[in-house]
Image (cartoon, grey):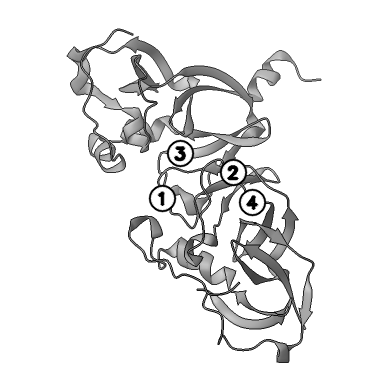
Amino acid sequence: MPGPAEARAARASLLTIQAVGSRWAIPSAAVGGIEPFDAATAETTLDLLALLGAAAAPRFEAWRVLVLDVAGEQRRLLVRGALELREVPAQSLLALPLALSLAAPLVTHVALVDGKPSLLVVSPERLLRASPADAGSRSATSTTLPEARSC
Amino acid sequence: MRALVPAKIGQAWVLVDAEIVREILGAESWLPIPGARAEMPGVIAWRGRAIPVVDLAAPFGFERLVAGATRARTLIAAVDESIVAVPVDAAREVHAFAAAQLKPVNITELPYAAAEAELFERILPVIDLPRFVAEISSGAAPDLERGGVAIHAGAG
């Protein structure tokens, strides 16, 4: 029987983001924090859903900033959508087929929930390297950051 | 003899080489990949891996798979060095055809037809699935999401 440490290692902790028609996930180990959106920092904040080519849920009012932290390097990402922490068995993370990696270059895996492919798992390392131009090219919607709103 | 699997997509019955079909499953839940082309719109989970979903309805000009929708059967096919899932509306038992029963494409108008054979009192196209998948993967086939023209089928 596996000990507690082995049991933890066999599970992956993900922060999930609900968008229109898709659910995204980031390994929670790479999330340094979640803050209310502040217009003063808008210039250094990238719209995560725009980077992913996804649309935010309509009338979702909670604008938050996810602080990505990978090996001490940080990036601030605007997130619009319901957030949830979820643990999944490590074996439920399946590598994205190569044939689809061009369409979704930030996605490395899909995660199964109840045996069904349900979450698109984004690479924190690739998010760090993504540029604002990527957001503009991947989203048909405006990537203009919102005015300051309460969290 | 050549073994072919009859499969129905939209209004059309087609034939697919049985030797590349690994398994026939029921309706499978699939995950759309945003930005993916209509012919390869997402993935399913199969034997502990994620494999691409290939939608033959897209080049045929039939109703495409949309998020949340499934088809009653899913062909799992080995194409080159990869495995793909092909959702279809129906599949039947394998039929064996003699070489003389396979004719050059003459009547059917579906793209990727490599030959024709008579079954169910109809002339059905034999679909070259490896060529279709290779063209999608290499980008040789026009991207239907980005202005490519679908060829509408006359088979049925």
* Residue for point 68% across, 47% down: B27
Given the image, on which type of amino acid does mark 4 rest? Arg
Output the chain of dot 3: A
Q: Which mark is residue B30?
A: 2
Whole-Å distance between the Cαs marked 3 and 1? 10 Å
Given the image, on which type of amino acid does mark 2 rest? Trp
Given the image, on which type of amino acid does mark 1 rest? Leu
Residue A81 falls in which quadrant of the image?
top left
Q: Is residue B132 above or below residue A134?
A: below
Whole-Å distance between the Cαs marked 3 and 4? 26 Å
Is A103 on the left or on the right of A144, as rendered?
right
Are discs 3 and 2 less than 8 Å apart at CB? no
Are discs 2 and 4 less than 8 Å apart at CB? no
Sequence-earlier tag: 3 or 1: 1
Q: Residues within 10 Å of mark 1 (few under 14, many from 20)?
A: few
Q: Is residue B18 above or below residue B36?
A: below
Whole-Å distance between the Cαs marked 4 and 1? 26 Å
* Residue for point 81% across, 20% down: A1
Which element carries disc 2, helix, strand or loop? loop
Q: Is residue A145 above or below residue B60?
A: above
Disc 4 vs disc 1: which is toward the camera? Answer: 4
Q: Where does label 1 land, which residue?
A: A102
Q: Position of residue B63 (x, y in %)?
A: 51, 56
Q: Where does label 4 land, which residue?
A: B71
Q: Where does label 3 land, which residue?
A: A107
Are discs 4 and 1 less than 8 Å apart at CB? no
Is B138 on the left or on the right of B26, as rendered?
left
Q: Same chain for marks 4 and 1?
A: no
Residue B77 falls in which quadrant of the image?
bottom right
Given the image, on which type of amino acid does mark 3 rest? Val
